[in-house]
Amino acid sequence: MASGDNELVFCALGGLGEIGMNAALYGFGPPNKRKWLMVDCGVSFAGPDLPGIDLVFPDVSFVERVKKDLVGLVITHAHEDHIGAVTELWPKLGCRIFATRFAANLLEIKRSAEPGAPKIPVEIMAFGDRLNLEPFEVEVIPMAHSIPESSSLAIRTPLGTVLHTGDWKIDETPVIGLPTDQKRLTEIGDEGVLALVCDSTNILREGQSPSEAEVAINLRTLIGNAPGRVLVTTFASNIARIRAVADAAEATGRSVIVVGRAMDRAIEVARDCGYFDGVAPFFSANSYAYLPREKTVVVATGSQGELRAALARMAQDEHPEVKLVPGDRVIFSSRTIPGNEREVGRVINGLVRQGVEVVTDRTEMIHVSGHPRRAEVAQLYGWVRPKIAVPAHGEPLHLFEHGKFARLMGIDHVITAADGDVVLLAPGAPSIVDEAPHGRLCKDGNLLVSANDPSLAARNRLAFAGIVSIAFALTSRGDLAGDPDVVFSGMPTHTRDGKAMDAVIDAAIFATLDNLGRGKRRDPDAAATAVERSVRGAIGAAWGKKPTVHVLVVEV
Ligand SMILES: [Zn+2]
Ligand SMILES: [Zn+2]
């Protein structure tokens, strides 16, 4: 291989255009003979545009095609948008996979709870490690974030070093774990950094995010001065927050009760990794009834209003073990993720209806984001001093604003790429040179289907206007044999003036067949198409909406 032909490229299959399903690739070598390194393999959560779908994965068919040249998959941290697709997609790749202990253990505990989930041989990496994944060398650097052990990766190649930040913020006092390693990042900056691929989540926010330690102080006050029981809801993986609640409980003479399976799992893994050393054991939900009200703090899942989570059930007074009473205090130590406002509102209103006091981050500083605001991003650019900036981890607006910001920071080359764009980082001037196959895959039941699959568009139509099924038989002479069978679903049974929808449909069928003439009626396909069109039209006129109409014609 002539070394002069080597190129270093970057391509994201997810995460550049959405906050979610992060999956980045670095390629090194001559075109068509590159070795690939993958960073993260996360999920995204489906919105109402995809009925019946919960999880969305990046389409990794491109990686499958080059999998013999895939030297490894490195996971930056254990958030679902970075690790959540591993169980589903790693079996297609079969490469070496690396994660820190917390991420590896959390993946394993989740995997073992899923029947039939494949065994994934994660190799544990630690901060300071340099993974030798020829032609890449990957150094693991600690970053503060809203989950333990978030890492940035210094990816060294013969054509230069890329710093891939993962998710991060600057926090000198992160409650648990290490702060962002300014010293090491500056040293790497001194060595020379070709490109910085950086988190854009909070680029629209000025200033610097407050510290996790400040949140801990405020939580302690709110737990200390609560007259009755206190419940704190947060993300299950936010171990620093749970630790802050546990410390506040200890300081105010309360016991901690943990409710929710995701919370149990995250705490078990965190305890195993030492993040609850010196903290008294927690109680489970079945102790709830026996512990004095003013001596307990409940930590529960459900801060996003998730229907099946513990808190939503308490809000409906349907939780089997935990019943809140007037005067209890529920603290939302979380931010409502855009799109979840209605669900969260429903939970809050259910609690307020029960006489429970609800405290949110609208009035108290009880949540901080794990992502960097502009002043923090500016500091990182100062430490790392890259030649090229590639905004990542954002919706188009975030990436665009981050690009503008990087230019303000005096970065020579700013490449605002989207999912699938192949960015040439070196040699020469960086630019987008190609497009790799990319897209979204939906977990539909136990199958994976493309988000563009016609079945999903059809499902949306069915949800909007229902379906009519019509069957009838025609003789070889084109006469109707017997009465048509009609079944419909998801539609009103009567029109505005009280006419049965069945009658509307029947009338349309008979009128159409009469008008067709015997010749056309001998062609079952033509008859089916004509009936479908007229029934849709007749229902459209009666109802104002057109359902899906299926017509089955048999010849007798
Ligand atoms: Zn994260
Ligand atoms: Zn993330």
Image: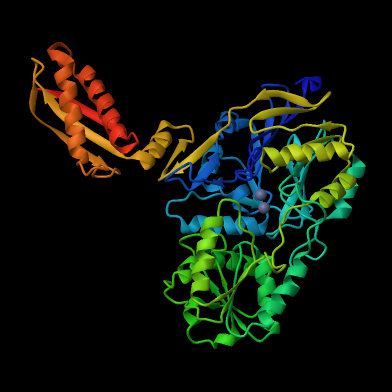
Residue 119 % position (x, y): 51, 50
Residue 115 % position (x, y): 42, 54
Residue 69 % position (x, y): 64, 31
- Quarter of the image with the C terminus is top left
Q: How many marks?
A: 0
Compared to 170, does 552 lie above or below? above
Q: State whether residue 58 appears in this view.
A: yes
Q: Quadrant of residue 396?
A: top right
Which residue is farthest front?
A: 497
User: Colour scheme used in the picture?
Assistant: rainbow
Q: Residue at x 78, y 64 (%)?
A: 211
Compared to 195, does 247 lie above or below? below
Q: Quadrant of residue 392?
A: top right
User: As rendered, which of 259 and 24 lies closer to the eye?
Assistant: 259
Residue 323 % position (x, y): 47, 78
Compared to 462, does 246 lie above or below? below
Q: Residue at x 51, y 45 (%)?
A: 46
Relative placement, left or right, of 152 versus 294 is: right
Q: Quadrant of residue 297?
A: bottom right
Q: Residue at x 78, y 52 (%)?
A: 373
Relative placement, left or right, of 61 versus 425 is: left
User: As rendered, which of 374 and 361 lies closer to the eye?
Assistant: 361
Which residue is farthest right?
A: 190
